[in-house]
Amino acid sequence: RYHFGGVEILSEAIALICLILGSSLLTAAVVAFSSQRSIVLRIFLGLSLLFGAFPLGFFVVALAVEKNFGDSMFRELFLLPGWQETAIIMGIVVLVIYGTWLFLALGSSRIAPPSENHSTRKRLIYLAFTVINAAIGWFICLAVDKDAVFWCLVPGTILTIFAGIDLMTEEMPHFPTVMMPFVEKRSLRAFASLLSPGWASGVLCYSLLAVITWSMAIAYATQYTSSIEEGLSIFSLFLTAAVVPVCIRINKTNPFANWWAVQWALIAAGILLSIFTSVMRASGLGVIGIFIPTTAFFGAMSSHYSSHDEMFVAAAIIGFFWLLAACVYAVSTHSDTYRQLLAEATLLHQTEKHAQQPLNTEH
C-alpha cells in the first residue's frame, strides 16, 4: 500500500488510536473477568468479548483500507463546528478511559483481600462521573441540540449498567475494617448506606445512578410536544433489567456468576417466547414477557406493532417495581449487618486511639 501510494496519514493515525483505545478497553475487561473463581464463567465471558472485538477490528480495517469510508466519516465530522468536533473526540476518549478504569476497578476489588475497602472510592467516582455526564447531557439537550443528548445518554446508560454489575455483585463484607472510612471521616457516615461495600448497599447506589442517567431521557422528552413514551420506557427497561438478578437467585454463592446466569436465562426465555408467538401466530401472548424487564423487549417486539407503546410503558412501570423490590430486599436483609460492622469499627477505632495515647504521652 505504501509502495503504490494512496495512503492517508490521517486515516492511518485515527485507525491506530482507535485500535489502542479499543484494545485497552477489551484488555481491561479481560482483567476484570479473569478475577472470577469459576473457570467456566471466565471462559464464557472471555469469549463474549469477541462480540466487541470483531466490530472494532472491522472498523479499524475499514478506516485504514477503505478510502471512501474514511473520507465520508471525516467529511461529516469536519462539517461540524470546531467546538463540537473537539467535544465529540474528547468525549469518546474520556468514555473509553473511564470504561477501562471501570473494568480494572472491578477486577482489582475482587482480587483484593476482603478486609480492605475498595468500594467507597469506586462509588464516589461512579457518582461523580454519572452526575457530570448527566449535567452535560441536560445542557446539550436544553441549550444546544436535543438530539445530541444521545451522545451522553447511550454511553452513560451502558456504563451505568456495567457499574451496576460491579456494585450489585460484590460480596457482603465480614470484617469491620471495611467500615473504617466512615468512622474516621464523619462526613461520610451519612452516606454509608450508599458507599459501604457489598451488594446490598450497591443496589441503593445503582438505583441513584440509574435515576440520574435516566433523567437525561426526561430532558429529551421535555423538548417534544408529541408523546415519546416508548423511548423513555426502553431506556428505563435497560436500567431496571440490571436489578432483576438481585431478586432471582440461581447461584447463591457467587453474585457475579448469578447476575450473568439470570440474564442469559431470561434472554433465552425471551427468544423462546418470540419463536413461540411467531410459530403459533399468537402475537397477543407477547404480553407474558412484560413482567420481567429483560424479557419485555422480546415480548413487545413479538406483539402487534400497534401495541408496542403500551407494552413498553407497562413493562417500564413493572420494571420500576422490580427496582423498588430489590431496594427493599437489600435494606431488609442486610441493614443490621452494616450497623453491626459500623459499631465494631467504631469500637476498634477507639481501641486503637487508646492504645496510642500512652505512646504519645511518653514521647
Image (spheres, grey):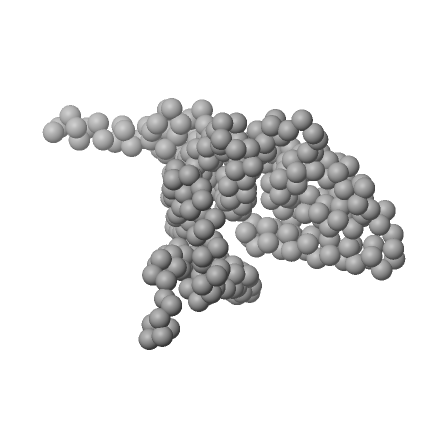
On the image, the x and y values in percent for residue 218 come to: 60, 30
Q: Nearer the viewer, residue 31 or 221?
A: 221
On the image, the x and y values in percent for residue 42 come to: 51, 62
On the image, the x and y values in percent for residue 269 come to: 73, 55
Residue 326 seen: yes
Q: Residue at x 64, y 33 (%)?
A: 324
Q: Nearer the viewer, residue 190 or 124?
A: 124
Question: In the picture shown, does residue 255 fall above or below 42?
Answer: above
Q: Residue at x 34, y 61 (%)?
A: 9
Q: How many marks?
A: 0
Farthest-out residue, left: 363
Relative to residue 103, is residue 291 drawn left or right?
Answer: right
Question: In the picture shown, does residue 40 fall above or below 123?
Answer: below
Q: Residue at x 47, y 65 (%)?
A: 66
Quarter of the figure with residue 210: top right
Q: Quadrant of the C terminus?
A: top left
Question: In the picture shown, does residue 158 fall above or below 225?
Answer: below
Quarter of the figure with residue 216: top right
Q: Residue at x 41, y 43 (%)?
A: 85
Q: Quadrant of the N terminus?
A: bottom left
On the image, the x and y values in percent for residue 302 come to: 78, 51
Residue 16 seen: no
Relative to residue 171, is residue 248 drawn left or right?
Answer: right
Q: Nearer the viewer, residue 224 or 153?
A: 224
Quarter of the figure with residue 20: bottom left
